[in-house]
């Protein structure tokens, strides 16, 4: 059996949470660290978003960290991480949505020249 390949970046919080769920689920992977300024052609050829984390296994690719977590934990969830109340998923949605968008606009204002970075701090 071939191991799933996890394309990751050590400091990316989304890649960290994917690696954490894979570890808790006891799923071994072929971990491939990505150099963000020089992404490997193999990674670019399979990743629709061209961002980490990205999991490739057999005939499927998962390129969202939360989806990687859910995939891993559905196979083995020894700590019951999937048994959170709906409010927990709502907080994840808020963090991954509105909060992350505001954070990016504050942290990387040059990427969003039409947005006011100070407004996004509120």
Image (cartoon, rainbow, N blue to C red):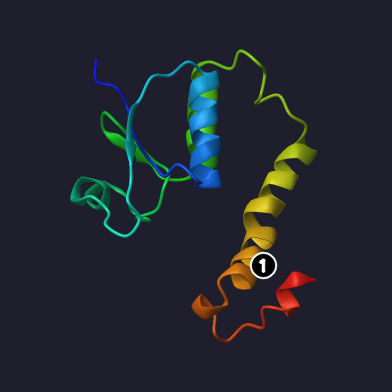
Which residue corresponds to the image point at 55% horizontal and 71% vertical from the top-left?
108
Q: Quadrant of residue 37?
A: bottom left
The one of 41 and 37 positioned closer to us in this rendering: 37
Q: Is residue 57 left or right of residue 104?
A: left
Q: Secondary structure at mark 1?
A: helix
Q: Is residue 109 above or below residue 11?
A: below
Q: Is residue 52 left or right of residue 89?
A: left
Q: Quadrant of residue 30?
A: top left
Q: Is residue 106 above or below residue 91?
A: below
Which residue corresponds to the image point at 79% horizontal and 40% vertical from the top-left?
87
Q: Position of residue 109 (x, y in %)?
A: 57, 77
Q: Is residue 55 above or below residue 94?
A: above
Q: Position of residue 100 (x, y in %)?
A: 63, 59
Q: Position of residue 21 (x, y in %)?
A: 54, 27
Q: Which residue is mark 1?
A: 102
Tally of numbered tags: 1
């Amino acid at each position: 059996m071939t191991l799933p390949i996890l394309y990751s970046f050590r400091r990316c919080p989304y890649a960290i949470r994917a690696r954490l769920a894979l570890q808790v689920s006891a799923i071994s992977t072929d971990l491939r660290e990505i150099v963000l300024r020089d992404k490997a052609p193999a990674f670019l050829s399979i990743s629709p978003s061209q961002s980490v984390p990205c999991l490739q296994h057999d005939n499927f690719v998962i390129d969202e960290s939360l989806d990687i977590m859910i995939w891993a934990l559905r196979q083995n969830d020894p700590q019951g991480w999937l048994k959170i109340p709906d409010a927990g998923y709502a907080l994840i949605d808020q963090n991954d949505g509105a909060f992350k968008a505001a954070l990016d606009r504050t942290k990387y204002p040059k990427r969003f020249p039409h947005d006011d970075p100070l407004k996004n701090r509120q």
